[in-house]
Image: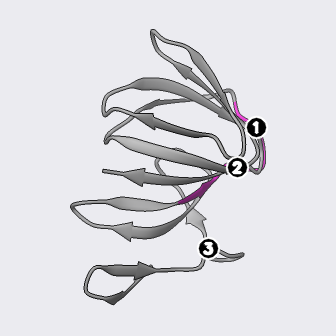
Amino acid sequence: MAEIADGVFVTKAGQGSFEADEEVGGRVHVLREDDDVQAGVWVAADQPGEGTPFEFPHHETVLVLEGEVEIEIEGGPTLRLRPGDMASFRKGVRSTWRPEPGFKEFWVYG
């Protein structure tokens, strides 16, 4: 992540630029992370899991870049998102994520 001018953030999410995501597993590359907005790219682990329960700590919007993910919404529908699909979730929504290996998304917390 680089702030190249006041309020202007630029990065390149290429090979070797991702770090382990301790919160939910997989790997993450952060574009911006401050009190107002967090944004970046997340890639699922190489091995499928049983599903990761997740309660959204912020409002979150995602754009699927590669692969597929099944998101089971507690008390709601089960989503199947593919490349080009977008979804947005309110803070506090409870879900279980089942991404395929190699799943990649661009995410924004606000």
State how far apart marks 1 and 3 are (Cα): 22 Å
Horizontal relation, residue 58 to residue 73: left or right? left
Q: Residues within 10 Å of mark 2 (few under 14, many from 20)?
A: some
Q: Which residues are magenta?
A: 41-49
Most foreground residue, 66 or 100: 66
Residue 13: numbered disc: 3
Q: Earlier in the sequence, mark 2 or mark 3?
A: 3
State how far apart marks 2 and 3 are (Cα): 16 Å
Mark 1 or 3, closer to the camera: 3
Residue 48: numbered disc: 1
Q: Residue lying furthest left in this view?
A: 35
* Magenta-span inclusion, residue 96: no
Instruction: Reply above or below: 37 against 52.
Output: below
Which residue lies at the image location 67% right of the left edge and 49% below the top edge? Answer: 44
Which residue lies at the image location 63% right of the left edge and 40% below the top edge? Answer: 85
Q: As shown in the figure, which amino acid type bears the numbered disc 3?
A: Ala
Q: Quadrant of residue 71?
A: top right
- Do the CB atoms of the residues marked 1 and 2 lie less than 8 Å apart? yes
